[in-house]
Image (cartoon, rainbow, N blue to C red):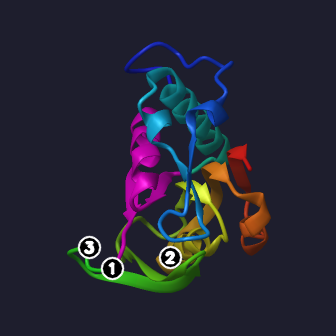
Amino acid sequence: MSSGGPPYNPGVDLKTLIRDVPDFPQPGILFRDITPLLGDPEGFRFALGKLSELAAASGAGTVVAIESRGFVFGAPVAAELGPPFVPVRKPGKLPAARMSVEYSLEYGENQLDIHEDAFAPGTRAFIIDDLLATGGTARAAAKLVEMVGGVVAGLGFVIELEALRGRERLAGYAVASLVTY
């Protein structure tokens, strides 16, 4: 990132800024907590800078981010690069006409929505979220982008949990992660 502070430090080790929380949000889940990363200005700038590089390289005309932690990264990336920011929301949060997709995630079922008029048909969209686990949420977001006429230019994640094989559900899309476990 070039505005709002000094350039990011390419030597930041993001794994040192991600906390493990066992048994959250339910027993058997190891939650990767980004709160320490958000609280570290240098680390946060680093993550935003790397995601900005990925989004710019994709040639995207819009940045799409998934509620809620994806917003933390997606909105600053869009502000840095200049394209519009489009939120993909959980049910009941969007006030205008919307498209919806139901999907499975690591520990349940959910739904995502996008406004029908989020962007012009043919727009290339770069999707950002904090975590790639099983790929259900990201796959649903990609499907929403396509349902409203967009083209998925790529997906960027701060964290990828490789053992859950989410990348496989995203076969055919360009996928990048800053940190893998």
126 falls in the magenta region: no
Residue located beneath label 3 in the image: 94
Residue visible at 65% across and 56% down? 154
Find disc 1 in the rendering and name its residue. 91
Mark linked to residue 108: none
Residue 129, percent from left and from top: 53, 55
Q: Amino acid at mark 2?
A: Leu
Indicate which label's residue lies in the foreground, 2 or 1.
1
Q: Residues within 10 Å of mark 2 (few under 14, many from 20)?
A: many
Gap between marks 1 and 3 measured at Cα: 8 Å
Image vertical order of residue 91 relative to residue 62, above or below: below
Q: Residue tagged by mark 2?
A: 144
Q: State the SS at label 3.
A: loop
Front residue of 129/83: it is 129
User: Where 112 sits versus 84, above or below?
Assistant: below
Give the number of the mark in front: 1 or 3: 1
Is residue 1 in view from this perspective? yes
**What amino acid does circle 3 point to?**
Leu
Callout 1 secondary element:
loop
Q: CA distance from mark 2 to mark 3?
A: 14 Å
Q: Nearer the viewer, residue 136 or 28?
A: 28
Nearest the eye: 46 or 52: 46
Q: Earlier in the sequence, mark 2 or mark 1?
A: 1
Residue reaching furthest to the top = 6
Looking at the image, residue 136 sits to the left or right of residue 33; the answer is right
For marks 2 and 3, the one nearer the N-term is 3
Q: Going by the picture, which residue comes out furthest to the left?
A: 95
Report the span colored magenta: 61-90
